[in-house]
Amino acid sequence: MTTKLTKFTQIFSTLMVAITLVFTPVFTQAATVSSDYKPQSLQEMIAYLYGIIAQLQAQLDAQNGVSRTPVNSSSDGVGVARPGSVSSSDIEVETLSATNIDVYEVDLRGRIDLNSRSYAYVWFEYGEDKDMDDTTTKRKITDSRSGWQSFSTNIDNLQDDQKYYFRVVGEDSRGDRDYGSIRSFTTDDRSGNSSSNSNNSSGNYNLSVSDTSVAKGDTVEVSWSVPSNENSPSNWIGLYKKGVTNSSYLSYRYLSNSDKGTIQFTLNSAGEYEFRLFIKNSYNEVETSQRVTVN
């Protein structure tokens, strides 16, 4: 027994030195580690190390503004958070299509479901590429009514005849965020050509549904449009459950060799669904529809 305890003590001392060397430079006030403590068993040593790690994690979270709820505990009552235990946002946001597209300005639209939260902040990220380095001012949405609430924000000082990407961001009272899908629009050019002309040559992709709440077995009509130079019989639309990867479609339809049209899907099972538009037989999503709830 003495030999085993000696080994435990040696291992414990080595780990204490390693923790001190790794974490001391990170924290201005490191967790207190007692060099006089001697574990009496392997289980006791593990419990003590969990406690030290929890203290260090708490200090790191405090520096980064993260709040964790303990979901497990060691034998000495110290809470230990498992990886991935930080709660995700309860709110849901969706990016809607842009409207009132002009030469230098546009109205960005989105909607939010607070899901019983009293309030949340929303804003848009946008830019000339999908990095979307620009942001709009945050605005507060309160729970004045149940369900989805739509909102819009005008942005100006844009470049003429330029394609922009954008998405909505929602942040709940805990600081957790939800992100909408990325959409795009193209501003008018100064010669007066509209970005929403009949042959859709501007570079916009659009995807919309006829109804966002249906019963099992109902048919939903999906309207789509692509730039005229992207016409292809290998363009396709997939039906997806909310949040799955692009390869996890439930069904799909190839589109006619046209820049716009409508197709129909029948939804037979309850749940939340969305449609995604892809170009030339790829899995590169260019547009996502509103979500459809099947009751």
Image (tube, grey):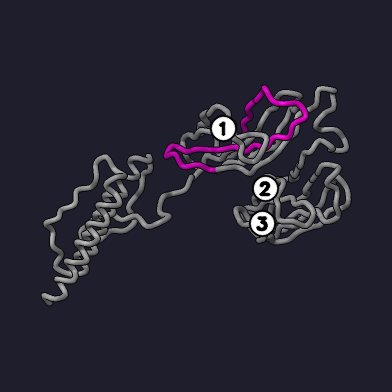
Q: Residues within 10 Å of mark 2 (few under 14, many from 20)?
A: few
Question: In the rendering, at what x and y percent does residue 77 appear?
Answer: 22, 57
Question: In the rendering, at what x and y percent does residue 97 appear?
Answer: 70, 37
Q: Amino acid at mark 2?
A: Ser
Residue drawn at (40%, 56%), measured in percent from left and top?
A: 83
Q: Amino acid at mark 1?
A: Trp
How far is disc 3 from disc 2 in space, using C-alphas? 23 Å
Question: In the rendering, at what x and y percent does residue 263 appear?
Answer: 82, 52
How far is disc 2 from disc 1 in space, using C-alphas? 26 Å
The mark closer to the camera, 3 or 2, is 3
180 and 268: which is toward the camera: 180
Q: Amino acid at mark 3?
A: Asn
Location of mark 1 (residue): 123
Residue drawn at (88%, 38%), measured in percent from left and top?
A: 199
Residue drawn at (84%, 37%), measured in percent from left and top?
A: 201
Q: Are marks 2 and 1 in contact (CB under 8 Å)?
A: no
For residue 130, above or below residue 102:
below
Q: Secondary structure at mark 2?
A: strand
Q: Are marks 3 and 1 in contact (CB under 8 Å)?
A: no
Location of mark 3 (residue): 246
How far is disc 3 from disc 1 in space, using C-alphas? 26 Å
The C terminus, quarter of image? bottom right
Q: Is residue 87 left or right of residue 255?
A: left
Q: Residue 74's image quarter?
A: bottom left
Residue drawn at (63%, 34%), measured in percent from left and top?
A: 126
